[in-house]
Amino acid sequence: MSDIIVVKCGGTAAVDSAAVCADVAAVRAAGRRVVLVHGGSAQIDAIAARLGVAQRRITAPDGSSARYTDPATLEVVLLALAGAVKPRLVAALTAAGAPAVGLTGLDAGLIVARRHGPHRAVIDGRTRLVRDNHTGRIVAVHAGLLRTLLDAGTVPVVSPPALGLDGAPVNIDADRAAAAVAVALGARRLLLLTAAPGVLADPADERTVRDVVTLTPDGGPPAGVGGGATVKLLAARDALRAGVGGVMIADGRAHQPVRAALDGAGTRVRLTGTTVPA
């Protein structure tokens, strides 16, 4: 197992991306190698509103919810992630003393995904046949480029979209992208930073953060978990069963959020039959 840490910075406005970048730089200065993966839901919503592109949600059979990415929304995703969020993160990291390189999954075929074919799904509460959704499932991460950048002392900053099998962009979930990157690199830790102190037993009460959530290798999240925590737990499950050393779902609003998560603040995720990682 490598010494690499993969940090996923949540895309909501509440997450303190500047603090995340400053802390990534501090962890790197202490000798750790870090890959930063990001989404950008707040920026996508803001740009979509300015351009008049309606936004909808789609619910998959596993219970996870994702952005319904029609052709117009795919353009917004590219504008927001590659044109707005990523340059800000790269600039913040570089200013903090951590030279960074911004990448989407399209660059050099870094992340490859198979676009979902026509399928039935729930969109805004109604089941319908979906044909124009440009989302997909990750099938490969070509980690050689990331290793080269890490060996050169830089922080790779990675986001959706992925490269489709037909060469066209495919939107993917950023949490699952972070998990796939962690697996491909044999990362020691995966930190999913979000706008909550961890997985909550009561979504309305941040005092109910769970210290540990145990998942089965093939099952979904435990009863009572919903919203954004669902996909994070599914991503954590994917990472753990493929050999990533440990996964924390932690607070991206905290002071020194990366180091706090590495020290155990948040929710540790484990699989049945395994011990909680130190």
Image: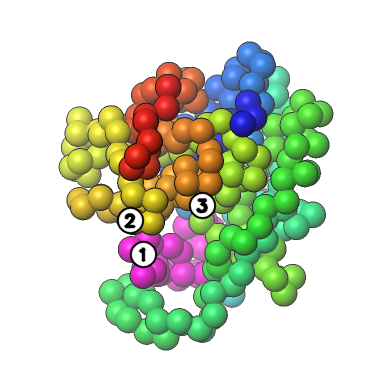
Residue 165, numbered circle = none
User: Left or right: where does residue 119 sit relative to residue 109?
Assistant: left
Under mark 2, the amino acid is Gly
User: Left or right: where does residue 227 sit relative to residue 162?
Assistant: left
Residue at the top extreme of this rendering:
30
Identify the residue position indicated by label 1 in the image. Answer: 62
User: Left or right: where does residue 87 sit relative to residue 118?
Assistant: right
Q: Is residue 58 magenta?
A: yes
Residue range highlighted in magenta = 44-70
- Which numbered disc, 2 or 1, marks the residue that appears first in the sequence? 1
Q: Separation of disc 2 and disc 1 at Cα?
A: 7 Å
Is residue 83 positioned above or below 265 on the image? Answer: below
Q: Quadrant of residue 167?
A: bottom right
Asked whether disc 2 touches disc 1, contact meaning CB atoms under 8 Å apart, the reply is yes
Residue 136, horizontal then vertical, whole percent: 55, 67
Is residue 219 positioned above or below 199 on the image? Answer: below
